[in-house]
Image (cartoon, helix red, strand yellow):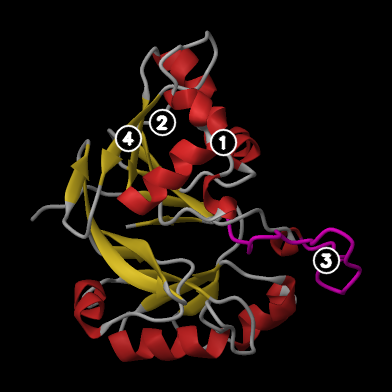
Amino acid sequence: MIFPSLKITFLGTGTSTGVPMIGCSCEVCTSTDTKDKRLRSSVLIESKKTKIVIDTTPDFRYQMLRANVKQLDAIIFTHPHKDHIAGLDDVRAYNFFSKKPMQVYANEMTQEVIIREFPYAFAETKYPGLPEIKLNTITVEPFTIGDITIIPILVWHLKMPVLGFRFGNFTYITDANKIDDAEKEKIKGSEIIVLNALRHDKHISHFSLPEAIDLVNELQIPKAYFTHISHQLGKHELVHASLPEGTKLAFDGLEIHI
């Protein structure tokens, strides 16, 4: 299969609270380094023909403005936690300019929460200015948006099933602390992987940084970027300098090409 060239933009690389965290005066939250300023985790996937965002965080509006995303073809959701769906209402702007519903791809569990959180978008009576959303059900089977084929990867966020996604030789996984062997086979052969790495210490539902590094080594992926980072991980510059060869901390605005 021939895959299109892709540009990946990290729209946000922080955990659910973002960094800085409200009310915190730790050295990370008070850092003047722009790489220590992290919106909630999301990425933009672009080919020459297609633009896709993974997850609409509470920062979605600002993320779209900051990255100057004037046209968007679709949104894919990993799971229904608030820090990954809360910004969905702001697709209204894309509806207005495109004159089309936003194509949203999510599993049934996530769709149920979206409908519950944004009931007005699915009501029979449509008022002007409400978001227009077309739900598309995905499972673990590959699907295609425009010229981009996506392979879902089932991972575990404690007991919640979450979807990671592989785009050609690039794999994106967030909010996970376990991946079954059969799903690891879908990841193998990737040239680049993005993994959540919340902090140094073990967490109940997220990979720690040591666990994320171990998984990269196990899967033998040449390049890895860590995301969904909390202030507990430490300052970007210091943590980044300590990482093994081939692994890096992602930061907001980072662009990579595959």
Disc 3 to disc 1, C-alpha distance: 23 Å
202 lies left or right of 78: right
Which comes sooner in the sequence, label 4 or label 3? 3
Q: For this view, does 220 lie left or right of residue 141?
A: right
CA gap, disc 4 and disc 3? 37 Å
Q: Which residue lies under the disc numbered 3? A: 29
Return the mark for residue 64. 1
The amino acid type found where label 1 is placed reads Met
| 237 over 45 or under it: above or below | below
Measured Cα–Cα span from mark 2 to mark 4:
15 Å
Distance from disc 2 to disc 1, alpha carbons, whole Å, reads 10 Å
| Mark 1 neighbour density, 10 Å: few (under 14) some (14–19) many (20 or more) | some
The chief SS type of the magenta part is: loop
Q: Which mark is residue 135?
A: 4
Please name which of the two marks, 4 or 1, marks the residue nearer to the observer. Answer: 4
Q: Is residue 22 above or below residue 120?
A: below
- Bounds of the magenta segment: 11-33
Write the residue at 38% across / 84% down.
Answer: 216
What's the residue type where badge 2 is placed? Answer: Leu
The residue located at (40%, 67%) in the rendering is: 173
Depth check, front residue: 162 or 25: 162
Q: Position of residue 250 (x, y in %)?
A: 55, 66
Q: Mark 2–mark 1 contact, CB under 8 Å?
A: yes
Residue named by callout 2: 72
- Indicate which disc, 2 or 3, sits on the residue closer to the N terminus: 3
Residue situated in front as seen by the camera: 137 or 27 = 137
Q: Say few, some or many: other residues with alpha carbon within 10 Å of mark 4 (under 14 / 14 to 19 / 20 or more).
A: some
Q: Label 3: few (<14), some or many (≥20) within 10 Å?
A: many
- The crowd level at tag 2 (other Cα within 10 Å; few <14, some 14-19, many 20+) is some
Instruction: Find residue 225 and report its horizontal and vertical position in percent.
Output: 48, 71
